[in-house]
Image (tube, rainbow, N blue to C red):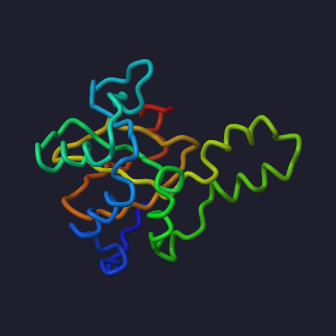
Amino acid sequence: IPVIIVGLKDLLYWDDKKMKHLLNMCGEVIVTPKIRKSHMRNEGQWAGLSNTDELPLQDLIHLIEDQGNQNIYLHDWSLTKDCPMFAKEIKIPKYFSRDALQEMYALIRENASFNEAASHFDLYANYWPSLFVGGNNTTSNAHADWCDTSAWMGIFEGRKEWVIVPPSHTQYLCKD
């Protein structure tokens, strides 16, 4: 069920100063951006996105902002893992302060019979918050997130369009 919460602008405020601050802290970090290759799901792709050449975060932001590259996309980049100093400064709205995957991970870890499942969760236990950055018209194919998770998203500039699909139609989505 989609929920829209208004009035969080001060909490989620983003401007050029904050982007410069992020780049000062983590601009040299190497990222692997995604590029839209196809409107169809292909092997090795998630939601029609494929990895492209690695480059420093500051170079990627330059490609998106200054050169208007509309096809390249920073997708689900872990601030916690890759830019922990900046992640500590992020204020998560109180409505979203509990992460169900992290709580589920803790429960799985407590139960020794679920070690195989726990090893898969190791990749994601401390992954969020993450950052998405894209130029105008950046898109991905219709998809359902791993483990049918849900997320909150703060839009700092521009707009994003979501298409909400009823459970009876999820068979038509890419599942990865």
Q: Is residue 98 above or below residue 134?
A: below
Q: Residue furthest left?
A: 67
Quarter holding the N terminus is bottom left
Q: Residue furthest right?
A: 112
Q: Is residue 52 above or below residue 136?
A: above
Residue plotted at (44% across, 64% down): 86
Residue plotted at (21% across, 66% down): 16
Q: Who is closer to the viewer here, 150 or 130?
A: 130
Residue 40 placement, left or right of 80: left
- Residue 79 image point, x, y percent: 47, 55
Q: Residue furthest top?
A: 43
Residue plotted at (25% across, 43% down): 59
Using the rendered view, name the quadrant where residue 6 is placed: bottom left
Residue 63 placement, left or right of 91: left
- Residue 122 image point, x, y percent: 68, 44
- Residue 47 image point, x, y percent: 38, 33
Q: Who is closer to the viewer here, 2 or 102?
A: 102
Q: Is residue 97 above or below residue 142?
A: below
Q: Who is closer to the viewer here, 174 or 65?
A: 65
Instruction: Report the label total.
Output: 0
- Residue 170 image point, x, y percent: 46, 38
Q: Is residue 18 above or below residue 151?
A: below
Residue plotted at (62% across, 59% down): 100
Q: Who is closer to the viewer here, 37 or 59?
A: 59
